[in-house]
Each structure stands twice: as structure tokens, then as C-alpha cells.
Amino acid sequence: MAATSATSATSFSIGSKISFGPKASQLLLPKPSVVRFNSQKPLATFSGLKATGSMNCESESSFLGKESYAALQNSSSPRSVKSTGRTQYHLNPQASYKVAILGAAGGIGQPLALLVKMSPLVSSLNLYDIANVKGVAADLSHCNTPAQVSDFTGPSELADCLKGVNVVVIPAGVPRKPGMTRDDLFNINASIVKTLVEAVADNCPEAFIHVISNPVNSTVPIAAEVLKQKGVYDPKKLFGVTTLDVVRANTFVAQKKNLRLIDVDVPVIGGHAGITILPLLSKTKPSVCFTDEEIHELTVRIQNAGTEVVEAKAGAGSATLSMAYAAARFVESSLRALDGDGDVYECAYVQSDVADLPFFASRIKLGKKGVEALISSDLQGLTEYEQKAVEALKAELKSSIEKGVGFAQKQSVAAA
Amino acid sequence: MESSSSQRVARIAAHLNPPNFELRREECRAKGGAPGFKVAILGAAGGIGQSLALLMKMNPLVSVLHLYDVVNSPGVTADISHMDTTAVVMFFLQVKEGENITMLNLLYECMHGLTLSYYCGVFIFQVRGFLGQPQLEAALTGMDLVVIPAGVPRKPGMTRDDLFNINAGIVRTLCEGVAKCCPNAVVNLISNPVNSTVPIAAEVFKKAGTYNPKRLLGVTTLDVTRANTFVGEVLGLDPKMVDVPVVGGHAGVTILPLLSQVKPPCSFTPEETEYLTKRIQDGGTEVVQAKAGAGSATLSMAYAAAKFADACLRGLKGDAGVVECAFVASEVTELPFFASKVRLGRAGAEEVYQLGPLNEYERIGLEKAKKELAESIQKGTNFIKK
């Protein structure tokens, strides 16, 4: 890779101004990283949002309709259907769960609500926000899918939003602007998460809680503290959503190695910010060889992908569409697990003992009660690079966790 | 000054790989059998466009997705490019004249595709796309399907017709691009007022000599979606199982749901018929009111548009029996354009179906619809012809 120093006056702008800091000193040769098309490769069977494990559910493919799904199956070779060898899970057509989205009128909330509305597993979709959610609900309610949409505006309606809900998704909060880290959002988002989780504790303590609000490394510990204070904490049901890191890892690895996206699965552990995101490239399925250079480049790219989007949006927000896609996939996995599917694996940031930290992201097996098992074997047999990275991330993750816990405990002391 | 900027140009040019872009496209064509289709969304950074881009990126029939807009398309592209689905996304950013874009100044010499990929201390920025003046052409070349949600949405109190002046001009420009760069593409037109913008598009294509009435479709799927949902509510049925044909146009009384032809066959009381018809006709306004100035239907429109685009792609693929309602050039009534069920195939809207038997209520509705529709069509046609 040629390292050329840019002139100090270089500022690149797309759309509006983006200026890069004085550290700008290297230009990478762009690698055309497009998945090459080969007509001999059959169209992969579309199983909606791809998740590890069962490929047999219709999930989001419902929006294509049965004709399209059948057409795709006919056009693709039987080999493209993954058979896990285990008993195939068939979607119970009566399956119907209630999902609440807190922050449904926001950048992530709206497309997330659309994707969840399209899921055949959802019978009720409760949308909550402090403003504008009536319009979003009216909009979505016109889609001809079974989920019933209801809107709830403001703290006085929060309790009703949560009653009887099976899965609560929390994308509420403010997004990053260029130059910000996820930690800069802490002050605002920490209070938001605290308030919302208090309501969850009061109204649907048995629900699965998916926390998206950044910085996830801190907001999940905050949520845990709040639930503990209310005496309803179930560590198996509290998740920080890190699916987007997995999605990004899959995409970048597939691009780099010209693999079929539907085959690629990269576990991502640690946390959900900068260097705390650790893709275990050595454990990629299917197994691939990477040069050391590629490992470093991919790891850094995956770690900074969120920032990549913040910069590209140049002040207009952070990742919303891909985050909605990833979050919807995780919601689907949770619903399938609730429904009895025994083959649901996802990466998520949960209370954990796989590393010597109270919270850690790793692959987990999901079941009716939430986290059924932590896949600690992911932390064994790591390469030297990955070992070093794990050690490096622990310090930052630890302090983020402590920051969250400290915030929640201080608040409870103040309230007492 | 000159030499340093030409040095910068040269250095950046050294990073460009235009041949690779050309090669990649040719590779796709040469391999034949179309593993996927090339779809462009014009207006991809808008309210409908973003969610539509998300859904199209998830569609396995799409191999290439071009996102075109006048603002923010790089951000939307960077966002959805991270999704682990097959479609490859590129942005196209139409820059206004005189806009202060330093990158553009540097790159005026290099109007090719540009890959921005540079590591600056902390940030990596890797988005593939195009910027500069003739970006519409680049966005459209080689496309199989062009979806156009571009334009401004209604505010409370506005009718779709109030949008006419702004959106008519936008649609004209975009269709001129389509005529020039992908005259054989199937065009899905969403920009309101559809009753007028589709005739505008037709006139633009006629002027360019590329008009193919089978390949120009106004998207009315949202009316069908709403009809299915509301009928499902009233009858207590799963809305996915309901199918109501909706004919006529895409505004107010021009929207005519044929409840007498609903599948599964059901009968309605006169009150139910009245309620449902009104609600389906005013569905869009319902959302504009609920959003109280924050826009019009975006999510449900994206859902419907993605469904319709998918149907078009399945038709292009050669699937049989793909039938959807759409606003097309038609001989079903004396009007030049009319929405009814069409069979989608490799040529686009290959067959336009007759309306079928109408009851008294629907016959009266049809006359009202035709009256207003005739004016809207004329307005659109005149916009180009004058």
C-alpha cells in the first residue's frame, strides 16, 4: 500500500463539508471491493434477514410474498439451502408476539418499525416516542401485515405501551455527529435509558430488553443496575445489540475474499465501540486465510465502520438503515427463540463470565428464557493478534462499564 | 498553485480505477443469465427513498443498486452498504452549480467513478460512488429498473395536485435522463401527483422517441395495500390474505377500490362500502394529518413500492402470473391512462386487464374518478407540450 502524505490543506467534502483532522497522512489504494458476479452461483435462498442457524423461517421474506419466495427456491440449486442436520424448525403460523419500540420516531426507530411490522411473528407493535410517533404509526398501520400498530406519546403513555410486551427494543437517544465518539453521547443517552428501563421494570419485567442506545458498553450496565434496584433483574434477558458489527464484519470479509455473503459468518466479541469491537477473523465460517495485513485492515475497518457512516452522513446522522436491519434481525432471532426454535445463535453484549468483566459480547444461544448459553469456546484458540486485542479492549470496556454502573448508582443515591 | 492542484489531481487520479468499474459491469453482462437486476432509485435520500433503499438492498433479485439524489446519497449508501446482502450499492450525488465542493473542483478533470478510501488517523471512509455534474447519466446507464420517489411531500391541507409545479419539473428532468441512458428500463413512478407525472413522463419519452407504454408504470400499490389492510380490519381477516383490486388513479376520488371483486369473496353492507371507499381514498391524507407537517407516508410507501418493484423484477425474470395494479397507458376506458390490474412480464406491463363487473356504487364512482382523472392527465400532458 502506497503511503502518500496529503498536503495539510487537503479537505475532502462530499455533499457538505467534511474535514479530516491533522492526522490525515496516509492514502490507501482503494481496493475495488465488489462481490464479483458469477452466473454459475445460484441465487441464494432468501430467508429474510440472515441469521446463524436455522434458515428455514420466512421471517422478513414475507414482504416478497409467497410467490417470490417459491420462485427463488425454484431458481436456486438445492445445495444452496443449508441443512443443519438438526430437526428443522418450522414457523408456527399462530406465533404472535408483542414488540415495543421505544424511540420509534427516530432515525433508527422508523425503519426498524417498518421491518418489525413486516415480520409474520409479530401480532402487536407498540411504538413509543416523545413526539411524532402518531404519524409513524398511522403510516405503518396501512401496511397489510398482521401486526397491529399502536402509538404512545410521552412519559404518561409509556406504561401502557409496555404492558404485556414480549420484546422491548430501545433505539432512543441522540446519534453521533462527525468527530464524536459514542462516549460523548453518554450524558444524554444514559438518562434516557435509565428512565425507559425503569418503566420496563414496572410494566413488563419478563420481557427481553434489546438496548441499542449508545454507548452500549455503558447503557447496558446502566439498565442492569436499574433493573437490580427494582428487584427484577434477569441477566438472561438483557441484551446490548451488537448485531450490526457482525453484519459489517460479514459484509467486509465477503467483499475482501469474494465469498457468497449468505455463507459468511464472523463472530464479533467484546463491546460495541472502537477497539472494544473485536471480530474473530480466525473463526470465520467458512474458514479463510487472511494475511496479517488483511486482518489488521479488516479489523480496523470493522471497528470504525460506524464512524465511517457518521462521516459519510456529514452531520445528517449515524447508521440508521443498517442498524435497523441488524436490530430487526436480532428481534426476529429473539422471537424465534421465544417460539421454541432450538437453533438460534447471535452475538450480543450480555452479562457474562467468559472474560473477567461483568459484561462482554460473545456468541450466545438464545432460548425461551433468553440467554441459554454463552459460547465461551469463542475465546479459546485465539490467534496472537486476537489475544493482544482482547487484552487491549478490556481496559476500555472495564471503564465504560464502571462509568455506566457509577451513573446508575449515583442516580439512585440522589433519588433516595 | 496550478502545479500543486494538478499534483493533487494526479495523485487522486492514480487511485481511480475506472477500468475496473467498466470491467465489472461488462463482467456482469457477459456472464449472462442475470444473477440479478440493476436498480436505480432516483431520490434515494428522501423520506421514501431511504426506506425503499433499505428494502431493495434486502431483495436478492437486485445485484446492483444505484442511489441518486441531490443531497445525502453518500451517507445513505455508506449506511446500507454495510448490510450483508448481495446487492452492491453506489451513490450518485448531483451537485448544484456553484456549490462549494472542494473535492469536486479537484476532480473536475476526473469525471469517472471515484473510490474514496483513505485512512486518516482514526477514520476510514470507504464509499463508492460518483459526484459532479452528469451524475444522473452515470446513475442510469445500464439500469433494468428505475424507481422514482423524488420530489416534495404534502403538508396538511395540501392536495397531491398542489405539488404539481415542483414535482413536474423534477420528473421531467429525471425522465429525460432515463430516455437518454436507459430507454429500455422499466420505470416505476412514485412522485405525486402520479395522475399527472405519468403523462408527463410519457410525453418526455415520446419527445425523445423512446416511449414504450409497457415500461412506464405509476405506482398505486399503496392504495391496494391500504385497501387490503382496511378490508381485513372490517372483515376480521388476515390482511395478507386479502386482495382488493384498486383502479382509476392515485388521488382522492380517482382511487376506486372494487370491493365487489375482493378476494376472498365477501359482501359488504352499504355503510361498510362507503366507509371503506372513503378511507382508502383518503388514506394518504390520513397520514399527512397524523404526521402534522412532518411529511407524508414514507414507510408504508416504501413497503408498497418495494413490493411493486419486486413484482416488476420477477416479471423481468420471466416468472408467470405476476399481476399487480398499476397506473399505465390503457384502453380500458376512454382515458389515455388508467390504473387496473396488469400482468408483468419481460416486456413490462404485458397485459392490461379489463375492469370486470362493477356494481352500481362502483359505476358511479368510476364516472367521478374519470372526470377528475381526465383533468389531471391533461394537466400533465400540457406541461410538456406547451
Image (cartoon, rainbow, N blue to C red):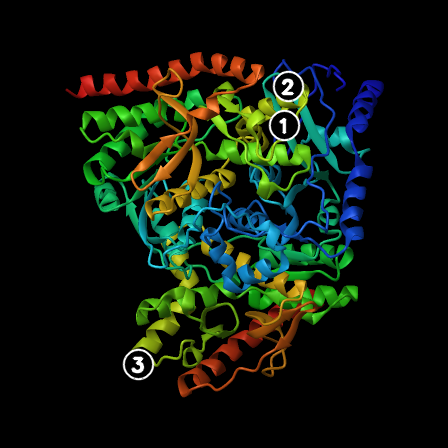
Q: Are marks 1 and 2 on the same chain?
A: yes
Decide: few, some or many residues near mark 3? Use Cα within 10 Å; few <14, some 14-19, many ≥20: few
- The residue under the point 85% across, 19% down is B3
Q: Determine whether label 3 and label 2 are within 8 Å by CB.
A: no
Residue A51 as seen in the image, left or right of residue A96: right
| Mark sitting earlier along the chain (3/1) | 1
Q: Residue furthest front?
A: A85
Numbered disc 3: secondary structure: loop
Q: Residue furthest left?
A: A416
Residue A316 visible in the picture:
no
- The vertical placement of B333 against A90, above or below, is below
Query: Disc 3 marks which residue?
Result: B269
Which residue is found at the position 39% from the left and 50% from the top?
Answer: A136
Q: What amino acid does circle 3 point to?
A: Thr
Task: Report the residue marked by disc 2.
Answer: B120
Badge 2 density bin: few <14, some 14–19, many ≥20, Cα 10 Å: some
Q: Which label number is shown at residue B125?
A: 1
Vertical order, B347 against A245 (above or below): below
Q: Residue A112's spot in the image, x, y percent?
A: 43, 44
Amino acid type at mark 1: Phe
- Locate the C terminus of chain A by quadrant: top left
Q: Quadrant of residue B72?
A: top right
Kind of element beneath mark 1 = strand
Relative horizontal placement of residue A206, taking residue B188 as reference (left or right) = left
Which label's residue is closer to the chain start, 3 or 2?
Answer: 2
Chain letter behind tag 1? B
Q: Are marks 1 and 2 in contact (CB under 8 Å)?
A: yes
Q: Chain of mark 2?
A: B
Q: Nearer the viewer, residue B187 or B168?
A: B187
Q: Give me the residue at 31% from left, 38% from top.
A: A208
Amino acid carrying label 2: it is Cys
